[in-house]
Image (cartoon, helix red, strand yellow):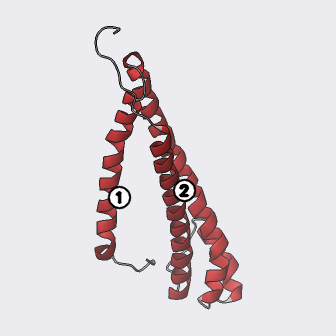
């Protein structure tokens, strides 16, 4: 995918991602609850929700930082590849890093920025895929359903 990829070609990926997130939320809570004794179910539920909230905020911040860093690191090469004059490159880099654009930019500049941004998004998606894979493996290997006794001691 690139900066000009139309939404009509990728909408199904967003639907798939949303469905996958929905299929993970309830089972992760259930796995936490069956992994502990009945007396500790409230603590397990609270821990799952706390980690979910902290993970969402931390993950968003880290992915945003990764995207911004990748954008800044790829921009000089993309500006050169798109034929932006050398004298204009530092001004474009400054405008992108500070968010202070002045008027419309030439097509070559917007194409270079779009490609650098797309590179950042792709890097973020690779990180997300690796984290999700590691979490899935850790869940499969570490979370065990422990049977609970209902009733007496015997």
Q: Which quadrant of the figure has residue 65? A: bottom right
Residue that mark 2 sits on = 63
Front position in the image: 89 or 23? 23
Q: Which mark is residue 6?
A: none
Callout 1: SS:
helix
Compared to residue 9, the image places residue 64 above or below, namely above
Compared to residue 75, the image places residue 48 above or below, namely above
Residue that mark 1 sits on = 17
Mark 2: give few (<14), some (14-19) or many (20+) Cα within 10 Å: some
Q: CA distance from mark 1 to mark 2?
A: 17 Å
The residue under the point 42% across, 29% down is 35
The residue under the point 51% across, 69% down is 122
- Looking at the rendered image, the disc whose residue lies closer to the viewer, 1 or 2, is 1
For the C terminus, the quadrant is top left
Residue 51 rendering spot, x and y as whole percentages:
48, 36
* Residue 83 appears left or right of 124: right
Residue 98 rendering spot, x and y as whole percentages:
62, 64
The answer to the question of whether label 1 and label 2 lie on touching residues, with beta carbons closer than 8 A, is no
Q: Can residue 117 be seen by looking at this rendering?
A: yes
Front position in the image: 88 or 118? 118
Q: Which quadrant of the figure has residue 91? A: bottom right
Q: Earlier in the sequence, mark 1 or mark 2?
A: 1
Callout 2: SS:
helix
Mark 1: give few (<14), some (14-19) or many (20+) Cα within 10 Å: few
Residue 37 rendering spot, x and y as whole percentages:
40, 20
Q: Can residue 84 be seen by looking at this rendering?
A: no
The residue under the point 59% across, 89% down is 82
């Amino acid at each position: 995918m690139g900066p000009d990829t139309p939404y009509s070609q990728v909408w199904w990926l967003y639907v798939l991602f949303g469905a996958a997130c929905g299929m993970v939320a309830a089972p992760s809570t259930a796995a936490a609850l069956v992994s502990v004794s009945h007396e500790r179910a409230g603590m397990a539920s609270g821990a799952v929700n706390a980690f979910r909230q902290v993970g969402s905020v931390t993950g968003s911040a880290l992915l945003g930082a990764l995207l911004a860093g990748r954008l800044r690191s790829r921009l000089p090469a993309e500006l050169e590849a798109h034929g932006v004059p050398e004298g204009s490159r530092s001004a474009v880099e400054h405008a992108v890093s500070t968010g202070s654009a002045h008027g419309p930019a030439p097509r070559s500049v917007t194409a270079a920025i779009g490609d650098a941004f797309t590179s950042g998004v792709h890097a973020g998606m690779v990180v997300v895929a690796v984290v999700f894979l590691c979490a899935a493996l850790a869940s499969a290997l570490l979370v065990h359903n422990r049977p609970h006794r209902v009733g007496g001691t015997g």
